[in-house]
Image (spheres, rainbow, N blue to C red):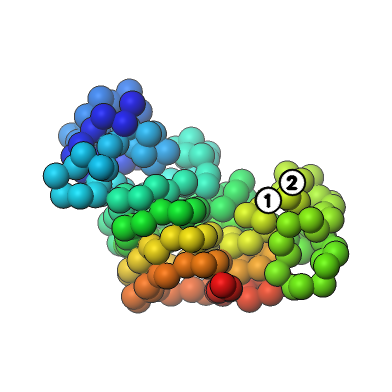
Amino acid sequence: LASITTDVWVKLGDDENGGDDSSVTGDEDNPFATIEWAIKMIDPASNPNGKTVINIGAGTFSPTTTQENFPVLMFSNIDLLGRGEANTTLDAQGTDKVIVFEYSTNNTVSELTLQGVCSGDPCGDTYTDANGNGIYDEGEVWDDLNGNGFFDEASDFRYYQGGGVFVHSSNPSFQNMTISGNAAISGGGMYFQSANSKLINVNIEYNDANDAGGIRAVG
């Protein structure tokens, strides 16, 4: 694994030259089926361009349609490039966050729609802000009333911060995107902590949270 030093492609299985995670090249004619597998197969540090672009084809990538596992865990020197926010959608279907950045640098995410995260009160989960700080950090008490698996590990604040995007100690850029229909306890659309990010032409709409339905930034 982690041996491909060129840009790669991810496409739907029913697309022309459809995606298959048994591909050994991930090139445009032999694309991967999932973003998760593409990340495992690439070696951005050895790419002559200094980073690797994962080109994502048109369509909806989700647990049911493409067996995509969420969240997409990003590492340094990786870009995600869709075919336009009206054409390429990452839909977590309520399973987890869409994209997570932790201690990651030199990333750009563009031309995508991110959707489908449901956690927190809008989905039936309740919480106790035990220390009263309003940020819902470590040590809170949680009840998973609807049994969807969220908030069972209150020692990890990622479970309830940031629906569509969670950014911690990272500096990703986001361009030409829609982040819609996500929910969390804090930062329904996006959550930033100790982060330095740039947003260009990013449409954040119809997200929900107890605290900051669109964006929450701290630290």
At 85% across and 64% down in the image, what residue appears? 130
Q: Tell me if mark 1 has few (under 14), some (14-19) or many (20+) residues whose alpha carbon lies within 10 angstroms of its own.
A: some
From what the image shows, is residue 154 above or below residue 63?
below
> What is the quadrant of the C terminus in the image?
bottom right
Q: Are marks 2 and 1 in contact (CB under 8 Å)?
A: yes
* Image quadrant in which you'd find residue 3: top left
Identify the mark at residue 153; answer none if there is no mark: 2
Work out which quarter of the rendered image holds the N terminus and state it: top left
Disc 1 is placed on an element classified as: loop
Q: From this viewpoint, which residue is outermost toward the left?
A: 48
Give coordinates of residue 150: x percent, y percent.
Answer: 72, 49
Q: Is residue 17 visible?
A: no
User: Is 143 situated left or right of 18 in this image?
Assistant: right
In depth, the one of 181 and 165 nearer the eye is: 165
* Residue beneath the point at 39% across and 47% down: 75
- 82 sits left or right of 192 in the view: left
Q: Secondary structure at mark 2?
A: loop
In the image, which disc is placed on residue 156? 1
The image position of residue 157, as x and y in percent, is 67, 56
Q: Nearer the viewer, residue 65 or 208?
A: 208
Do we see residue 29 in this rendering?
yes
Q: Residue at coordinates 59% horizontally, 62% vertically from top-left?
A: 162
Residue 177: x percent and y percent? 38, 67
Instruction: Give me the residue at 19% from left, 42% from top.
Output: 47
Q: How many marks?
A: 2
Q: Amino acid at mark 1?
A: Asp
* Picture quadrant of residue 21: top left
Amino acid on which disc 2 is placed: Glu
Q: Position of residue 33 (x, y in %)?
A: 36, 35
Q: In this rendering, is residue 199 above or below 106?
A: below
